[in-house]
């Protein structure tokens, strides 16, 4: 989520089957995406809808110019079956 929130993801990598949360929360901007309503509120976003995770992720990817790459687990095992390739690193981020 952090890479999508910062428009830092060049590609989102997924190992199927992915066990995503039932809902994600989104704001009016494509980078306003979170795992919980409280997370989105902490960014100052109010009055936001819950969305199915697929729709929320595709919107964030498309609007930030990131790609979606589905890769089999046996070729590239990803922790939690999700990963990101970054456009840039942020030295100030932890």
Image (cartoon, rainbow, N blue to C red):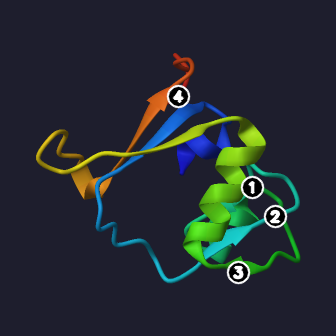
Closest to the observer: 10 or 75? 75
Which residue is denoted by mark 3 in the rendering? 50
As drawn, 28 above or below 23: above
* Mark 3 vs mark 1, CA separation in Å: 12 Å
Which residue is denoted by mark 1 in the rendering? 32
* Mark 2 vs mark 1, CA separation in Å: 5 Å
Q: Is disc 1 surrounded by few (<14), some (14 to 19) or many (20+) residues within 10 Å? A: many
Q: Mark 1 or mark 4: which is in front?
A: 1
Residue 94 visible within the image: no
Please tell me the numbered disc located at residue 27: 2
Which residue is denoted by mark 4 in the rendering? 93
51 left or right of 18?
Answer: right
CB under 8 Å between callouts 2 and 1? yes
Instruction: Tell me the residue at 70%/81% (across/down).
Output: 50
As drawn, 42 above or below 62: below
Nearer the N terminus, badge 4 or badge 3?
3
Tally of numbered tags: 4
Closest to the observer: 41 or 73? 73
Residue at far left of view: 74
Nearer the N terminus, badge 2 or badge 3?
2
Q: Quadrant of residue 8?
A: top right
CB under 8 Å between callouts 3 and 1? no
Q: Quadrant of residue 92?
A: top right
Q: How far across and how far down the image is residue 58, in percent?
A: 64, 57
Q: Quadrant of residue 19?
A: bottom left
């Amino acid at each position: 989520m952090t890479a999508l929130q910062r428009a830092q993801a060049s590609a989102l990598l997924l190992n199927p089957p992915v066990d995503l949360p039932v809902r994600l929360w989104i704001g009016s901007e494509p980078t306003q995406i979170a795992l919980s309503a409280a997370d989105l509120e902490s960014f100052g976003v109010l009055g936001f809808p819950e969305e199915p995770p697929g729709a929320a992720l595709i919107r964030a990817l498309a609007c930030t110019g990131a790609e979606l790459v589905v890769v089999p687990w046996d070729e590239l095992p990803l922790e939690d079956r999700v990963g990101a390739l970054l456009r840039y690193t942020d030295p100030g981020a932890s």
